[in-house]
Image (tube, rainbow, N blue to C red):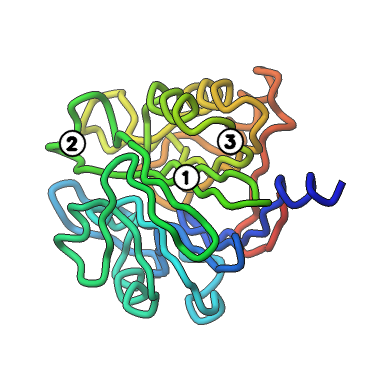
Amino acid sequence: MSETIERTTLEALHVGGPTLRFRYAGRTWLTDPTFDAPGDYEGPIPLHKLTGPAVPQERVGPVDVVLLSHDQHADNLDNSGREFLTTVETVLSTPDAAGRLNGVRGLANWETVPIGDARVTAVPALHGPEGCEPATGVVTGFVLQADGQPTVYVSGDNASVALVEQIVQRIGGIDIAILNVGAANVGRFGDTDLTLNARTALQAAEHLGDAAIIPVHAEGWAHFTETLDHLTRVFAYGGRAEQLHIPRPGESFTV
């Protein structure tokens, strides 16, 4: 029984937005650091942050590894997040991000690197519809594996259900999936979303089998168009309510 508990348990803290701290294979990991207070970010398409982190940066504690989906957008890496990267020994992201940020190791799709007792594989992600990369940039997801530990999929800002299916086919069973949801949409591609919406998240869950689903990056910015309540209803109607584990920002939890 203890082996089952080890392989299906993840201790985590939702800082807010896409930022999740968790323990895995003896190390502390953090996804997409965002610690700024609410505010506006200028650019080709302005972004508007509505809520700050539930946990301030100084309370996050030491982090061994950052998994950075991409560096192009403030809702995945804001000003404070960029400063935070300088305090972390290992930052994994896209090759493009490594070309722009000092201290970042870029991984190509399906490239695997050892981090202590864990193996981290970069997996494909698509931040919008097919062919969106010239507009939204290249992004990545990650799969973490280690002996006696659950296999964890971190989607990053991925909107493609087909890629989730491809990842499962190539990696094998996923025990825990951290999915960026919220139907992010800034109008760049009309009604086509930049991240998973409730419908596509449910489709992704079907490919993920009985994996525990941890939805993040759904609230706190003006460009999210679906609530977590809506996501919960869609999963319930789809017969997968027990698969969904919605974290409370600022509270530690175990899946």
Give the x, y percent position of residue 52: 46, 65
Helix, strand or loop for disc 1: strand
From the viewer's side, name the closer residue of 32 and 53: 32
Q: Rounded to the nearest whole Å, what is the CA distance between mark 1 and mark 2?
A: 21 Å
Q: Name the residue under label 2.
A: 133
- Of the residues shown, which amino acid type is indicated by label 3? Ile
Q: To which residue does mark 3 refer?
A: 174
Q: Distance between the residues labelled 3 and 2?
A: 27 Å
Q: Tell which circle, 3 or 2, labels the residue nearer the N-terminal end.
A: 2
Point 56% across, 68% down: residue = 27
Q: Earlier in the sequence, mark 3 or mark 1?
A: 1
| Left or right of 85 in this view: 204 | right
- Residue 206 image point, x, y percent: 58, 21
Nearer the observer, disc 1 or disc 2?
Answer: 1
Q: What residue type is labelled 2?
A: Glu
- The residue singled out by tag 1 in the image is 143
Q: Which amino acid does label 1 sit on?
A: Val
> Cβ–Cβ below 8 Å for labels 3 and 1?
yes
Residue shown at the point (47%, 45%) measured from the top left: 143
2 up-or-down from 134: above or below: below
**Which disc is residue 154 wearing?**
none
Q: Quick check: 66 above or below 124?
A: below
> How crowded is the residue under tag 2: few (<14 C-alpha within 10 Å), some, or many (20+)?
few
Pointer 1 or 2: first along the chain: 2
Residue 48: give x, y in percent of width and height.
32, 54
For the point 28% across and 51% down, the residue is 107
